[in-house]
Amino acid sequence: LVTSGTNTSFLALNSSTITDMNMNPVIEVSKTDAIMMTLIPDTNSPSIVSYDLNLTAGTIVLTFTESINASSFTPTALTLGSSAINPSQQYTLTAGTHSE
């Protein structure tokens, strides 16, 4: 979303934007009647919800509580292990790539 440098944005839509389950079109909001919205910055850090490790494919899928910037992923900061208590059973990634 691009704004003019302020923390507000405007929304307008025409009747062909979307319909309900009975195919009734949404009520149009013209550009002159656009709805003003205040943008609230995201200050919450994501946390991991789950992961799926596939040793055959050599992949791991990480699921987070919110959208993340996949290009910020640092594979070498990820450690896998059979137990958090036994460090001899841990493996820290030495390389990797990401996909979205």
Image (cartoon, helix red, strand yellow):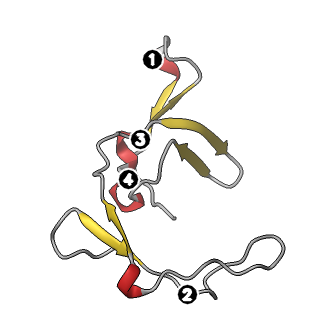
Is disc 1 in contact with disc 2, using a CB cutoff of under 8 Å?
no
| Residue position marked by numbered label 2 in the rendering | 14
Q: Earlier in the sequence, mark 3 or mark 1?
A: 3
Tell us which disc is closer to us: 1 or 4. Answer: 4
The residue at which mark 3 appears reads as 46
Please give the name of the residue rendered at 39% of the width and 86% of the height, measured from the top-left corner. Answer: 31
Sequence-first tag of 1 and 4: 4
Q: Does dot 1 land on a helix, a strand or a loop?
A: helix
Q: On the rendered structure, is 3 left or right of 89? A: left
Mark 1 → mark 2, Cα distance in angstroms: 59 Å
Mark 2: few, some, or many residues within 10 Å (few <14, many ≥20)? Answer: few
Determine the CA span between mark 3 and mark 1. Answer: 26 Å
Label 2, label 3: how far apart the Cα atoms are: 34 Å
Determine the secondary structure under disc 4: loop
Amino acid type of the residue tagged 2 in the rendering: Asn
Identified at 76% across, 79% down, the residue is: 24
Please state which of residues 55 and 21 is positioned toward the viewer in this rendering.
21
What is the three-letter code of the residue carrying label 3? Pro
Furthest-top residue in this view: 85
User: Which residue position holds label 4?
Assistant: 73
Taking 38 as reference, is 31 left or right? right
What residue is drawn where x is 70% and y is 81%? 25
Question: Which label was assigned to residue 3?
Answer: none
